[in-house]
Amino acid sequence: MEAFDFNKSMEYFWKNRTMYNESVLMVSNDGKLPEASLLYKPTKIISVKNARLDKEYIENVDWFFEDGKLRLTKKSRAPFLTREQLYPAEPREGWTLPRIGGGYILFQEGHYLHDMQLSVTYTHTGDQWTGPVPVFNKAMLKKTLAILERKETLKIVLNGDSISAGANASGLMSVPPFQPDWGHLFVRKLEEVYGARIEFVNTSKGGETSDWGIQNVDTLVANHHPDLVILNFGTNDGTCRMPIDRYKNNIEGIIKKVRSVNSDAEFILISPLMPNYLAALPNNPEISFYGEQEKYLQALYEIKEDGIVVVDIISIHKELLKHKKYYDISGNHVNHPNDFLIRWYAQVLCTTLIQD
């Protein structure tokens, strides 16, 4: 049996009473026992495993839960980092970026953070989520729904940056539990629910902005003659401080070009992700990657055409960051989601086409 459980991973976070493999990074401050916060107050902790899901840690031997915190014991076998390792005073080539206010911040691609994080499964009351709740609206993507319901072949193109490309998903890094990126999770769920055949093309590329998207719209999107296009730009645009009007014009230009080839094409527009940011302290980012990202959501909502739906990831991410640290749910500590947050992307995306 595969370590990655697709069905449990796709149970909606805002309604399920069991949190499946919530990620945490155990951190020791000033020599104290490493600790982390869970999103919800647990009624029972079922398991604490490594992020690869191939090693389970034992309660009161490796960990305990006390005063609302998950803590490691002195002799725990579980991995952890110190505050000094996350925020070193001196730079380390290939490992750090400058931190606003002084010092440095740990930055690592690949599976370094994945291997340091833990996965916690626990039950809770099911009423503790206070952030946005995605809602299915069958009137938004009617043509796509019709294709799925007729069980015809649906052509989907996903175009965006590294987050869309699946950066830091364990499957793309070829490490356990080999979880796919959120685009493939979404497609797999559609195929499961509708029994339809889906042709899925992901033309995303790391480091790119919506400027690149509009410049390459013919070859990367329009020429595939898609029925549904998923656009996920803005995280890098915001870092580059791209003006809001230019960002909006780029997205509108992509839509116009695709519809000149297929007038029936429909679109899912995904808001950016927050770069490393301290949500408990408004307007207090940790690194310079934070810029205009929050302003792009309204720009997407202003694109009012039939067959277009906006997915508000950024508001959900901000709510998460009120309760968890950025390093708990990031794959690189800067601007990429880890397996846990990737699953949230996929779950929210599913509500655009699947009625619960």
Image: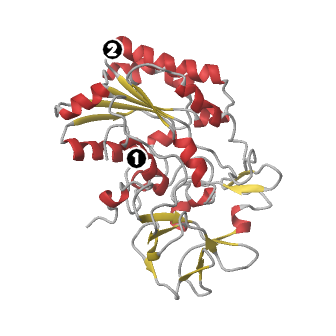
Which residue ends up furthest to the right in the rendered image? 102
Instruction: Relative to 78, say whether 285 is above or below.
Output: above
The span from disc 1 to disc 2 (Cα, nearest Å) is 27 Å
Question: At 28% across and 25% down in the image, what residue appears?
Answer: 143
Q: Residues within 10 Å of mark 2 (few under 14, many from 20)?
A: few
Which quarter of the rendering shows the N terminus? Answer: bottom left
Residue at 34% x, 61% y: name it. 8
Q: Position of residue 97 (x, y in %)?
A: 71, 50
Label 1: how many Cα within 10 Å (few below 14, some 14–19, many 20+): many
Kindly identify the residue that appears in the image at 62 percent across and 56 percent down: 326
Q: Is residue 106 left or right of residue 139?
A: right
Q: Can you tell which quarter of the image residue 13 is in?
A: bottom left
Q: Going by the picture, which residue comes out furthest to the top?
A: 260
- Residue hosting label 2: 263
Q: Quadrant of residue 63?
A: bottom right
**What element does badge 1 sit on?**
helix
Amino acid type at image mark 1: Ala
Residue 74 picture location, percent across and down: 62, 86
Location of residue 12 in the rendering, given as x and y in whole percent from the top left corner = 39, 54
Residue 303 or 48: which is nearer the viewer?
A: 303
Q: Identify whether 273 is placed above or below 68.
A: above
Point out which mark residue 346 bears. 1
